Amino acid sequence: MNLFERWLTLWVLLCIAAGIVLGQALPGPVRALGAMEVARVNLPVAGLMSDRPAAEVNRALGGLNAAARELGSPLNSPFMTLSFVSLPSIPEAGLTDKGLVDVRARKLITVLI
């Protein structure tokens, strides 16, 4: 395990802290980035589920898919496609809470460049 991997948690925390400091020090650019939002689906329950009615979430997901198509995605439902990427049972590779996994070799794939 190299230095970056060994201290990854620290690097993530430092990036979060830097983001908070920049947001406080330079609120204008942060607001400008926020204004660039084109679609949103709120998932307040663990970032995976919504407490809103299914019809409301489905409408928001439709808007999200439309925004992705406007930005050039060739997929009909790119976010549902991404949700299946996380299943470790899909052959070749999967995304789990431990990282990217080579399912056939049953080992983690280093994604650092």
Image (cartoon, rainbow, N blue to C red):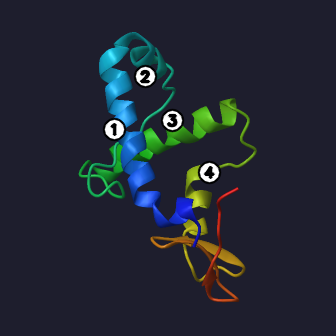
The answer for how far apart the CA atoms under marks 2 and 4 are is: 24 Å
Residue 2 lies, in percent from the top left, at 59, 67
2 and 1 marks in contact (CB < 8 Å): no
Given this view, does label 3 or label 2 mark the residue nearer the observer? 2
Residue 58 lies, in percent from the top left, at 43, 47
Type of amino acid under label 4: Ser
Residue 55 lies, in percent from the top left, at 36, 47
Please name the residue that numbered disc 1 is placed on. Answer: 17
Q: Is residue 82 left or right of residue 24?
A: right
Write the residue at 42% across / 41% down: 15
Given this view, does label 4 or label 1 mark the residue nearer the observer? 1
Please name the residue that numbered disc 2 is placed on. Answer: 34
The answer for how far apart the CA atoms under marks 4 and 1 are is: 34 Å
Residue 106 lies, in percent from the top left, at 62, 88
Write the residue at 67% across / 48% down: 76
Q: Quadrant of residue 112?
A: bottom right
Q: Residue furthest front?
A: 3
The answer for how far apart the CA atoms under marks 3 and 2 are is: 17 Å
Task: Give whichever of 22, 79 is nearer the camera.
Answer: 22
Q: Is residue 76 above or below residue 24?
A: below
Given this view, does label 2 or label 1 mark the residue nearer the observer? 1
Q: What is the crowding at mark 1: few (fewer than 14 residues within 10 Å), some, or many (at least 20)? A: few
Q: What is the crowding at mark 2: few (fewer than 14 residues within 10 Å), some, or many (at least 20)? A: few
Type of amino acid under label 2: Gly
Type of amino acid under label 1: Ala
Write the residue at 43% across / 22% down: 34
Given this view, does label 1 or label 3 mark the residue nearer the observer? 1
Residue 77 tag number:
4
Instruction: State which tag comes first along the sequence, 2 or 1.
Output: 1
Residue 63 tag number:
3
Q: What is the crowding at mark 4: few (fewer than 14 residues within 10 Å), some, or many (at least 20)? A: some
Secondary structure beneath dot 1 equals helix
